[in-house]
Image (spheres, grey):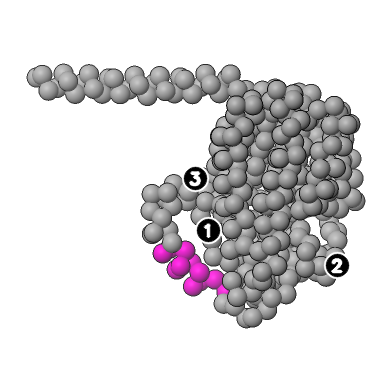
Amino acid sequence: MQQGNDRERMLGGLAAGIGLALLARELLRRRSMIDLAGKVVLITGGSRGLGLALAEEVVREGALPVICARSASDLEAARQRLLAQGAADVLAIPTDVREREQVEHLINATVRHFGQIDVVINNAGTIMVGPLESQTLADFEDTMATMFWGTVYPSLTALPYMRRQGGGRIVNITSIGGKVSVPHLLSYSSAKFAAVGFSEGLRAEVAKDGIEVTTVVPGLMRTGSHINAIFKGQHEQEYTWFGLGASTPGLTVSADYAAREIVAALKRGDAEVTIGLPAQLAAGFHGLFPGLTSEIMTLVNRLLPASNGDTQRYLGRDSRTPITESFLTTFGQRAAEHYQPEEPNDRVLRESPRVVP
């Protein structure tokens, strides 16, 4: 009898402790919650894909968006689109986030125009798909320049302004590829792992200044980005498996859903948010069974297209097959129509080894 009572008291105490912990977390969330109305929100890579979806979402919240990308024409189209959706003002500045001086100009111009910078969303990215044998050192340098340094430069440049303002928010869009390294995405995963490490450490360092840093870990999203991704090796086969994965409901989430989840996490000041059930399961499984995850990825690699020695870069839109144009990718095609420019600067992309989408 005594043992039963002790067990009940222990379970009751545990339940009470869990309840108090959940209550404390909710109170902290509410205390950290911000209203985006009137806030200046900078989004890198904001002219297409997830960046454009995020810009549309912050406009709905009443924020003043600043968008940057390399293409001036894409930016102007996005600016007009956001103004038509009710944005009070939109600042669009052509910027290559791999170049520190350009990023410094972007941040300084934002503060000159609006007088403040409240939120930085580091979203600019590139996708490079292909077997290791098709990857060059330049490929690794490009992905690191865009997704690591392209996260570091805006963050560190904005920090002094945020400190003077007494606070701010930084959101770093990483990837499930920054938690689980996937075959044929090695340069991409390497850069995303680096971005995750930077983002997590940055949060710990700047919390004392009233600055919240959120690490976003999306799984596959239907943003249409696969048509502007870069494919190497047997590029048509690589594009086929990637395009199917980026288009299948259940495996993917829509861009607008991802944008809503990210903006909600930004407003709460969450440390990390993982978007999509498949990504949540993958991250959890890898955390519990890293060795088994590695073995599974070894098996996956054997199912992917073999290397043919070709190191040339091909856009997804130039790698289409009957499968990728079939009903199997309907949702991905719709996302591309909505979130991707119709005529990107393909010639420059193909000719320059330093240019990424």
Q: Secondary structure at mark 2?
A: helix
| Quadrant into which the C terminus falls | bottom right
Q: Is residue 324 above or below residue 101?
A: below
* Residue 181 badge: 1
Q: Secondary structure at mark 1?
A: loop
Q: Amino acid at mark 1?
A: Ser
Mark before the other along the chain sequence, 1 or 3: 1
Q: Nearer the viewer, mark 2 or mark 1?
A: 1
Left or right of residue 323: residue 344: right
- Residue drawn at x 32%, y 22% as measured from the top left: 15
Q: CA distance from mark 2 to mark 1?
A: 31 Å
- Residue drawn at x 62%, y 55% as measured from the top left: 191
- Residue drawn at x 49%, y 24% as measured from the top left: 25
The residue that mark 3 highlights is 280
Given the current orientation, which residue lies at the most extreme bottom position? 308
Image: magenta residue range = 295-305
Mark before the other along the chain sequence, 2 or 1: 1
- State yes or no: discs 3 and 2 in contact (Cβ < 8 Å): no
The residue that mark 2 highlights is 347
